[in-house]
Image (cartoon, rainbow, N blue to C red):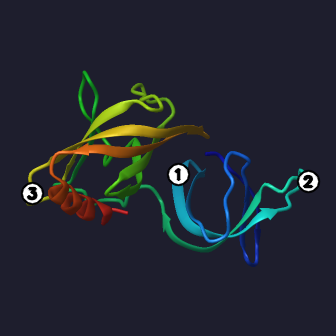
Amino acid sequence: MRATMIRVEKGGVVVSTSDRRFSGGEDVRIWFALDGTARSFEASVIRAGVPIPDRSQDGLMLGFIDRWAEGAAAGGTEGRVLELIPPNGPAVSLLESGARLLHIAVDGLSFTVDARAKLVWVESGRVLVRLGIPGSEPVHASARVRSLASEEGYLLYDLHFEEVDDMDAHRLVIAGLATLL
């Protein structure tokens, strides 16, 4: 889903989207690019139906803004593995330069890559993901591209894990990779 940042107010941030209706109390994660760097934050919808300059009622007031992230944390990735494995060709690491991990959880992950990247997965397409942390064997999960958006020189991917080899090991590895954010 796409949104446009309208303004920053004392009570929060106003964004506009006509793609989906929200109600007060919903939690959202917002991704955006600033100065060529992918960033994100979490917020709660304080009020829906906020008037915006185009005179529509598609505005959302976001508040309780927290958990700012700027791509993946620099360094500290030794021994960690987070790779997308295409049907042919080498694996693509989401922990090396050129990709920025924005969010990872037991049910999926989000990341950005440069829009000039040669390897592009299509929306609703499937991809194999290899995940690993020091002291444990890598685990594999099949994921589906839930959404793909092109923003200011970046491609933003949201993947949903569908099939996981070993759920207990998967949870452990996700917890270890989440420390990078």
Q: CA distance from mark 2 to mark 1?
A: 31 Å
Q: Amino acid at mark 3?
A: Ser
Mark toward the start of the polypeptide (2 vs 3): 2
Q: Nearer the viewer, residue 135 or 48?
A: 48
In the image, is 158 to the left or to the right of 17?
left
Q: Which residue is mark 2?
A: 55
Tag in front: 2 or 1: 2
Tag in front: 2 or 3: 2
Residue in view at x 15 percent, y 57 percent: 169
Quarter of the view holding residue 142: top left
Q: Is residue 161 above or below residue 47?
A: above
Q: Secondary structure at mark 1?
A: strand
Where is residue 105? Give x, y as percent.
35, 58
How packed mark 2 is, by other alpha carbons closer than 10 Å (few <14, some 14-19, many 20 or more), is few
Q: Is residue 72 above or below residue 27?
A: above
Residue in view at x 42 percent, y 37 percent: 145
Where is residue 6? Give x, y as percent.
77, 58
Q: Is residue 78 above or below residue 148?
A: below
Q: Which residue is mark 3?
A: 136
Q: CA distance from mark 2 to mark 3?
A: 55 Å
Q: Nearer the viewer, residue 74 or 92?
A: 92
